[in-house]
Image (cartoon, rainbow, N blue to C red):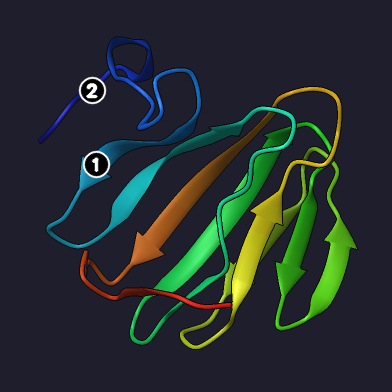
Amino acid sequence: MEKVNEHELEYRGGDSGPKYLFRGPNIDWGVLRFLPGQELGYHIHERVEETFYFTRGAPKMIVNGEEYRVKAGDAFRCEPGDKHNIINDTDGPIDAVFIKHIYDPKDKKDVE
């Protein structure tokens, strides 16, 4: 058993970015916060499935060239090989939960 408290952990960028709650041995699990103008960056995973669940804000989610305007409560599951990005083009912060399975921290590949 493992227990964490999100409020005791830091975002990668200090006040924004990903914040991992659990890393391995079977999944990566955490939360994202992007401030206005920030984005995740286009990337793919060769073996990892990645799911996003949005809890606040209305960013743009782009998957394989298709753009979606997100609303709180939306969930997206990206299969291995799906090129994806989240862009906060709004005037407020956005929050989401992410889950990656299988655990393979070296599987991410940045793409244009």
Residue type at numbered disc 1? Phe
Q: Vertical placement of 69 versus 44: above or below?
A: above
The C terminus - image quarter: bottom right
**Do the residues under discs 1 and 2 have CB atoms within 8 angstroms?**
yes
Residue underneath mark 2 = 4
Give the label on residue 40, or none.
none
Q: Residue at x 50, y 26 (%)?
A: 16
Q: In the rendered view, does 65 fall on the left or right side of 100?
A: right
Few, some or many C-alpha atoms within 10 Å of disc 2 (few <14, some 14-19, many ≥20)? few
Task: Give the image location of residue 111, x and y in percent.
Answer: 51, 78
Q: Which residue is drawn at 46% across and 85% down?
A: 80
Q: In the rendered view, does 91 fall on the left or right side of 43?
A: right
Q: Residue at x 35, y 47 (%)?
A: 29
The residue lying furthest to the top in this view is 8
The N terminus - image quarter: top left
Name the secondary structure under disc 1: strand
The residue lying furthest to the front in this view is 112
Q: Residue at x 79, y 44 (%)?
A: 59
Task: Give the image location of residue 88, x and y in percent.
Answer: 75, 41
Q: Vertical placement of 47 versus 8: above or below?
A: below
Few, some or many C-alpha atoms within 10 Å of disc 1 (few <14, some 14-19, many ≥20)? some
Mark 1 to mark 2 CA distance (whole Å): 8 Å
* Residue toward you, 38 or 4: 38
Give the label on residue 22, or none.
1
Residue type at numbered disc 2? Val
Q: In the rendered view, does 112 fall on the left or right side of 46?
A: right
Mark 1 / mark 2, whichever is N-terminal: 2
